[in-house]
Amino acid sequence: DAGVTQSPTHLIKTRGQQVTLRCSPKSGHDTVSWYQQALGQGPQFIFQYYEEEERQRGNFPDRFSGHQYPNYSSELNVNALLLGDSALYLCASSPDTRDSPLHFGNGTRLTVT
Amino acid sequence: KNQVEQSPQSLIILEGKNCTLQCNYTVSPFSNLRWYKQDTGRGPVSLTIMTFSENTKSNGRYTATLDADTKQSSLHITASQLSDSASYICVVSARGSTLGRLYFGRGTQLTVWP
């Protein structure tokens, strides 16, 4: 049973470009959350998707957008990249129950130059 | 303001020794508290989840405690191994939606030396 898979593992972009990151949740999970983790910091919540809708959102600008497909896979899109967007982007999935642990993927390392 | 503070920021111990990591939070209303282990370059992996009514929960050599009155938690690692070298992240969930809003600490970087 595959866990959470993310692609690509690494990515290098230049300022102003756009990027799409992808996530396949663990089998049986219908909720996907995205996090940004800067070096030496804890993950920061970007948004959460459930039933193909954005259900919650953290303090991130509209340049960050997402999508969830009927098979529960998800994408994170970032427009007009800034140097400060360089980080590890983590996807986490879970069933839609309060006390379920999040299952994280190994992330996409985005470098903006 | 909902916050999660962890201490120490980093810790070095010798293999076989025990250690305790601390987590203080101000998240309210409280739902649950989770400890995660994050190896370098990998995603976090859940160690324990504790709700309001639970004081202690163990997972092998890892034992987490929770004092909901003082809003403090600790993670105790017994007989440390080299593979315990990782960042340990405390995550507190606030009630307010189906899954709740999660607040992450910055983590404690643990290094175990042979």
Image (spheres, rainbow, N blue to C red):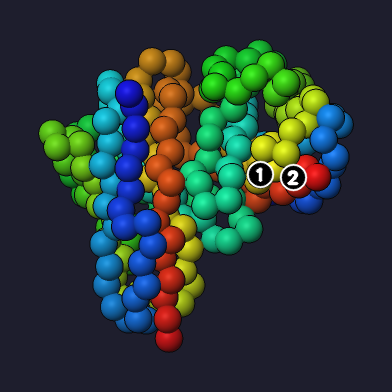
Q: Callout 1: few (<14), some (14-19), or many (20+) C-alpha neighbours within 10 Å?
A: many
Horizontal side, residue A48 vs residue B98: left or right: right
Give the percent coordinates (x, y) of residue A93: 59, 35
Q: In terms of image quadrants, where is residue A74?
A: top right
Tell me the chain of label 2. A
Q: Let me know if marks 2 and 1 both belong to one chain.
A: yes
Look at 28% across and 36% down and name the residue there: B25
The amino acid on which the numbered mark 1 sits, given as a three-letter code, is: Ala
Look at 42% across and 51% down and name the residue there: B107
Residue A10 showing in the rendered view: yes
Quadrant containing the N terminus of chain B in the rendered view: top left
- Dot 1 lies on which element? strand
Give the percent coordinates (x, y) of residue B80: 35, 74
Q: In terms of image quadrants, where is residue B70?
A: top left
Query: Farthest residue toward the bottom?
Result: B114
Look at 34% across and 26% down and name the residue there: B2
Real-space Cα separation, disc 2 to disc 1, in angstroms: 6 Å
| Residue A87 image label | 1
Q: Along the line of sight, which residue is nearer the eye, A65 or A12?
A: A12
Give the percent coordinates (x, y) of residue B13: 34, 76
The amino acid on which the numbered mark 2 sits, given as a three-letter code, is: Leu
Tell me the chain of label 1. A
Horizontal side, residue A24 vs residue B11: left or right: right
Query: Are discs 2 and 1 less than 8 Å apart at CB?
Result: yes
Earlier sequence position, callout 2 versus callout 1: 1
